[in-house]
Amino acid sequence: MSQSVCILGVTGSIGRSTLKILEQHPDQYSVFAVTGYSRIKELTEICKQYRPKCVVVPSQKVDELQQYFKAENIQNIEILTDEAGLITVSEHPEVDVVMAAIVGAAGLLPTLAAVKAGKRVLLANKEALVMSGDLMLQAAKEYQALLLPVDSEHNAIFQCLPQNYLQIERHGEPQLGVKQVLLTASGGPFLNHRLDELKNVTPAQACKHPNWSMGRKISVDSATLMNKGLELIEACHLFSIKEQFVTVVVHPQSIIHSMVQYVDGSTLAQMGNPDMCTPIAHALAWPERITTHVPPLDLFVHSQLDFQEPDVVRFPSLRLARNAMKEGGLAPAILNAANEMAVAAFLAERIGFLDIPEVVEHSLNHVQNGSADSIDTILQTDQLARQVASQRITQLES
Ligand code: NAD
Ligand code: MG
């Protein structure tokens, strides 16, 4: 039977890749709802082509969307607005699969709504899990949602773990013969930059990733290695393992997407060309497989694979994220909120590249940690961390 899909953040890089896969399998999937935030013309084009039943935009964009709809003679698509609209489509009874591909904390409540409605949730929005890890996983268990990783590394780890790994009880120690997880990192565009060279790098340089084409926020996170820090936290939650069982390995070619080491000396790796369509297709179809346009890996072309240890002196974000995970509680939410603010300020050319981890560390030191036992507490702490980060950004500017 055909599966009905809701794509949160359809105008983004992951959203578009999801559409690419769905259109290759029209008998298996239909698009029920899509959501966008700013690129309304592109959203209209998507509505025209895929004819969803619902579309969600911010209320201040409704007029613009209606004008485009009128010009294109698009009818019979219900327009919903704001966070309430995002939640409505995420938990809609007609939806089977939710692609959580909004960037940042804005994706938390819709993603959680999808989980609480027991959907198959394809998780790209790592920030949501970083903020609310334990609560999100508890909810997935309670409401029998299938939370499947789309982030290429976590998807790779999932593919290398024993089949039933997500179903078994886990409490921090790796199970079923797993010894540790090796999380690969490309190292980003500044892997070989000296510390003094990092000081003056520009947003355009930071957004030019050597292997992946992604949204601007995650591109900057890849350049600072905060992306790997967020992914470390993501892995601890998804696979219920403590941070000491996750080792980050810099692998500049991005051919191995991550690995799992077993107690018998085996190391399993998932490999492929760097294209998000592969993990998206995997999460959509799991436990089955569907075709994609991604060409098979040609190992005669990619004949050299390199590995090195990450440098936490030039890239302190990784250290900050690991410490936040070790501390637990609200620390990951503080880290995430401060990072979102700092990245936005860097992209707006208000602060320098090396100021990003500075703002994050400052915020971690000035916002009280505590137990992340409710979504309200997490959201309040997120707001507080944003205020503290914002003040620090203003100080650094002057
Ligand atoms: P993007 O910037 O290309 O797209 C983000 C999407 O979120 C857009 O559709 C935008 O309209 C929407 N959005 C932004 N702010 C919003 C708000 N306040 N409210 C509602 N919607 C909002 O980002 P992306 O690269 O597609 O990444 C999306 C998520 O997937 C991120 O969490 C990222 O970390 C994760 N991810 C991306 C990749 C990748 O290759 N692009 C890989 C792994 C994980
Ligand atoms: Mg990733």
Image: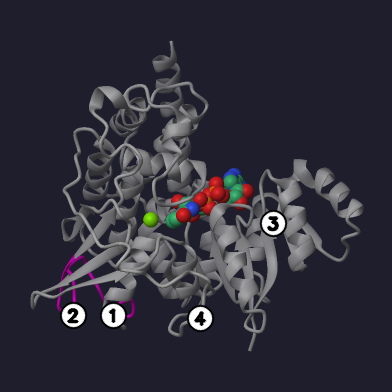
In front: label 4 or label 1: 4
Residue 205 sits in quarter: top left
| Rendered location of residue 359, percent (x, y) | 36, 28
Identify residue for label 2: 176
Q: Amino acid at mark 2?
A: Leu
The amino acid type of the residue labelled 3 equals Gly
**Residue hosting label 4:** 290
Query: Is disc 1 surrounded by few (<14), some (14 to 19) or many (20+) residues within 10 Å?
Result: few
User: Which quadrant, please, contains the C terminus?
Assistant: top left
Q: Earlier in the sequence, mark 3 or mark 1?
A: 3
Q: Is 169 a magenta residue? A: yes
Image coordinates of residue 60 in percent, x first then y, are 76, 40
Q: Which residue is at the far left?
A: 264
| Alpha carbons under labels 2 and 3: distance apart | 41 Å
Q: Magenta span has 63?
A: no
Q: Amino acid type of disc 4?
A: Ile
* Separation of marks 4 and 1 at Cα, in angstroms: 26 Å
Q: Position of residue 376 (x, y in %)?
A: 48, 49
